[in-house]
Image (cartoon, rainbow, N blue to C red):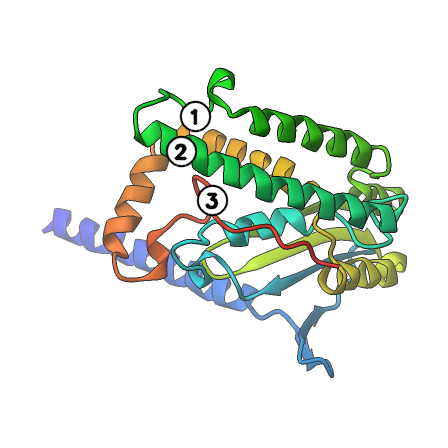
Amino acid sequence: MDFMRERYQWLMTLLSLVLSGSLASLHAQKVPVVETNLANGMRLLMVERHDEPSVAGGWVAHVGSANERPGITGIAHLFEHMMFKGTPTIGTKNYKKDLEIISRQERIRNEMRQEERKMRAAYRRGEIDDMFKPENKTPRYKELEKEFDKLIAEQREILVKNEYDQIYSANGGSSMNAFTSDDMTAYFVNVPANKLELWMWMESERILHPVFREFYAERDVVFEERRMRTDSTPLGKFEEEFSAMFWESLPYSWPTVERECNSKFIPFR
């Protein structure tokens, strides 16, 4: 009986601790959020703080990899990366020349895709063993590669690398980053309280006037991110295979960071 009484007391003590923790957790969730809707339809959530003179700002778009479809999988995450590339006034010294170079780059890439089709057909016929080997590339493809590399070098002369981060850092900002999930894409940064207007301008420009520079270089960055976070981790591919089976008939079946982005580049202007 003593054993049962002690066990009962122990269980009641544990239950009281759990209940008190749950009540404390519920109390902690009572954040004084002020909600308002802007004229453009954006919902604005604000929490006033007096513990430090800074603003933690961010915005969320309810669009993610679940909004993709077969053939364009991976585009939501790649789009998140490209939104760091700047605007007509951020990220370049010569916007007009920048657009001209981007247009010329894409014309060359279209020709390169045509040559890739020829190499792929040769691979299927067994005429070459690997279409990515330099010796198996068509003469025209090699010429186009050189032309494309020249345009990359030309564009680098007028680019201002990471200017978003430079502007925020020069004005006391920190922790600028973004993420993409199945259902959302979010951008966030901390700025001093007297730089709230700067944050509003920077992020509205990011949304309204993005310019997608260095598309193919950034696509390679995404490929490397996938290799680091998925292909080289113990459970990365297993989790993808499990999701593919579990969400078989839903858009959650494919990963956010795809093996490749199949979409064609369309520059924003």
From this viewpoint, is residue 54 visible?
yes
> Any mark on residue 215, and which?
none
Q: CA distance from mark 3 to mark 2?
A: 25 Å
Percent position (x, y) of residue 242?
Answer: 26, 45
Circle 2/circle 1 CB separation < 8 Å? yes
Frontmost of labels 3 and 1 is 1
Q: Which residue is mark 2?
A: 120
Q: CA distance from mark 2 to mark 1?
A: 7 Å
Dot 3 or dot 1, earlier in sequence: 1
Q: Is residue 193 left or right of residue 225?
A: right
Tag 3 secondary structure: loop
Q: From what the image shows, is residue 264 above or below residue 24?
A: above
Q: Give 140 or 267, whichever is nearer the viewer.
A: 140
Kind of residue at badge 3 = Val
Q: Give 194 or 86, whichever is nearer the viewer.
A: 86
Q: Which residue is mark 3?
A: 257
Percent position (x, y) of residue 60?
Answer: 61, 63
Q: Which residue is mark 1?
A: 131
Dot 3 or dot 2, earlier in sequence: 2
Q: Is residue 239 left or right of residue 256?
A: left
From this viewpoint, is residue 234 visible?
no
- Image quarter (top left, top right, bottom left or bottom right) of the C terminus: bottom right
Q: From what the image shows, is residue 98 above or below residue 52?
A: above
Kind of residue at badge 1 = Met
Dot 2 or dot 1, earlier in sequence: 2
